[in-house]
């Protein structure tokens, strides 16, 4: 592991677009937390413990009350893609020593997209580069969420409706996934099964039957979904 | 800020599950053991179902029957989708959609 100016500038060049995005989205998360009564220290805590944008946004509505089991299953569902990310990095991270546990813990979508591409720029120490890219991405998310929470605690404004930022974010991801995948069965299944369960089971517990139905249908329709090259790229 | 142990537990539990998906596969398959096809398949497709599930979760308290009949949501979601298809910039769409939605629920409906 070598970290010099060279590694720092290479990592910054790779991470800069992600850092800008993370600071803005992180600030959105921090504001949302603040509006729900959870200050910037809570946001930092969440960013260290969970470190998953989607997971953290969803957690906000579960912080006050609700069954822990649902929070656990929801987190599992949201993070399922990380199983695939981590497995595909085993070969690359083999010689990273004890630092590899940090690399796996903080392997979010964007970091994965950057580090799964290649070995890093020529003439740069790969281990140092990987560590810095991962660290810069996580730090900018956490700093953004702190700033959002802190600044919105200073200003007072009518925040009614700010929760919609989460819905809007998921809709943009949904559309992008739709464009990127050949089989739309998973995308339709997620929406329809959950809507049906919301109507049948009510607003308290519908996520659990919805998740069960989704896993069962995915298992039964595996041939059909994979034949069309359903989700060839999970990013 | 009152100390909220439920919130603490929720964050710890969600963190543990997230960490599990990132670390457990490495602990189990790190020594070259064959990864079951089925696990890889779920890892690939579940994320594509999760977004639809989360969108419905976000909208779980919206009612079509009671006024304003989900109009703020419908209008704002149309704008989010439209701007995203046009510019492919998620931050832009999220900011425009959220500001519009806040305006609609605070001043219009």
Image: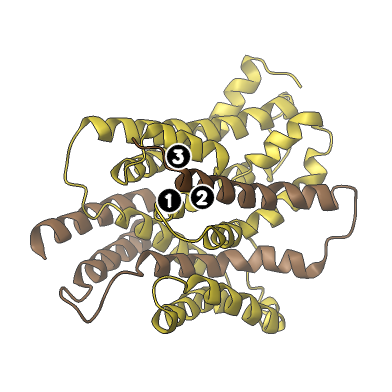
Chain colours: A yellow, B brown
Can residue A144 be seen here? The reply is no
Q: Say which of B52 and B83 sits in front.
A: B52
How far, Cα to Cα, is label 3 from label 2? 23 Å
How far, Cα to Cα, is label 1 from label 2? 6 Å
Q: Residue at x 56, y 67 (%)?
A: B48
Occupied quadrant, residue A195 = bottom left
Q: Is residue A45 above or below residue A231?
A: above
Q: Say which of B55 and A136 sits in front.
A: B55
Image quarter in which the C terminus of chain A is found: bottom right
Image marks 1 and 2: residues in contact by CB distance under 8 Å:
yes
Instruction: Kindly identify which numbered label has been placed on residue A63.
Output: 1
Label 2 sits on a secondary structure element that is helix
Determine whether, in the image, residue A6 is placed left or right of residue A187. right
Determine whether, in the image, residue A181 is placed left or right of residue B107. right
Label 3 sits on a secondary structure element that is helix
> Which chain contains the residue that carries disc 2?
B
Q: Position of residue B6 (x, y in %)?
A: 47, 48
Labels 1 and 3: the sequence-earlier one: 3
Can residue A158 be seen here? The reply is yes
- The residue tagged 3 is A22
Q: Residue at x 53, y 63 (%)?
A: A70
Image marks 1 and 3: residues in contact by CB distance under 8 Å:
no
Determine whether, in the image, residue A26 is placed left or right of residue A45. left
Image quarter in which the N terminus of chain A is found: top right
Q: Is residue A122 above or below residue A51?
A: above
Q: Position of residue A71 (x, y in %)?
A: 52, 58
The 10 Å Cα crowd at callout 2, few under 14, some 14 to 19, many 20 or more, is: many
Nearest to viewer (mark 1 / mark 3): 1
How far, Cα to Cα, is label 1 from label 3? 22 Å
């Amino acid at each position: 592991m070598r970290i010099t100016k060279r590694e720092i500038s290479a990592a910054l060049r790779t991470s800069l677009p992600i850092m800008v995005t993370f600071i803005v989205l992180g600030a959105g998360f921090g504001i949302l937390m603040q509006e729900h009564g959870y200050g910037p220290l809570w946001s930092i805590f969440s960013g260290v413990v969970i470190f998953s944008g989607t997971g953290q946004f969803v957690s906000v509505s579960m912080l006050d009350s609700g069954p822990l089991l649902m929070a656990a299953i929801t987190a599992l569902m949201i993070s399922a893609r990380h199983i695939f990310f981590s497995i595909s990095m085993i070969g690359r991270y083999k010689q990273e020593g004890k630092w590899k546990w940090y690399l796996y813990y903080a392997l979010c979508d964007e970091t994965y997209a950057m580090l799964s591409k290649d070995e890093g720029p020529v003439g740069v120490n790969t281990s140092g580069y990987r560590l810095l890219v991962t660290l810069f991405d996580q730090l900018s998310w956490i700093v953004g969420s702190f700033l959002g929470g802190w600044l919105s605690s200073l200003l007072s404004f009518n925040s009614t409706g700010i929760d919609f930022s989460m819905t809007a974010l998921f809709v943009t991801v949904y559309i992008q996934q739709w464009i990127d995948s050949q089989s739309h069965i998973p995308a339709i299944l997620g929406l329809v099964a959950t809507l049906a369960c919301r109507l049948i089971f009510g607003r308290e517990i519908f996520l659990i039957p919805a998740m069960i139905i989704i896993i069962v249908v995915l298992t039964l329709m595996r041939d059909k979904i994979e034949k069309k090259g359903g989700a060839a790229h999970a990013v | 800020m009152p100390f909220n142990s439920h919130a603490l537990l929720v964050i710890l539990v969600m963190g543990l599950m997230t960490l599990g998906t990132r670390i457990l596969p490495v602990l189990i398959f790190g020594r070259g053991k064959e990864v079951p096809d089925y696990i890889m398949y779920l890892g690939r497709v579940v994320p594509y179902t999760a977004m639809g599930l989360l969108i419905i979760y976000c909208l779980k308290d919206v009612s079509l029957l009671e006024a304003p009949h989900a109009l703020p949501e419908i209008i704002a979601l149309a704008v989010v989708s439209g701007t995203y298809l046009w510019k492919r910039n998620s931050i832009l769409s999220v900011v425009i959609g959220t500001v519009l939605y806040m305006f609609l629920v605070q001043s219009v409906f």
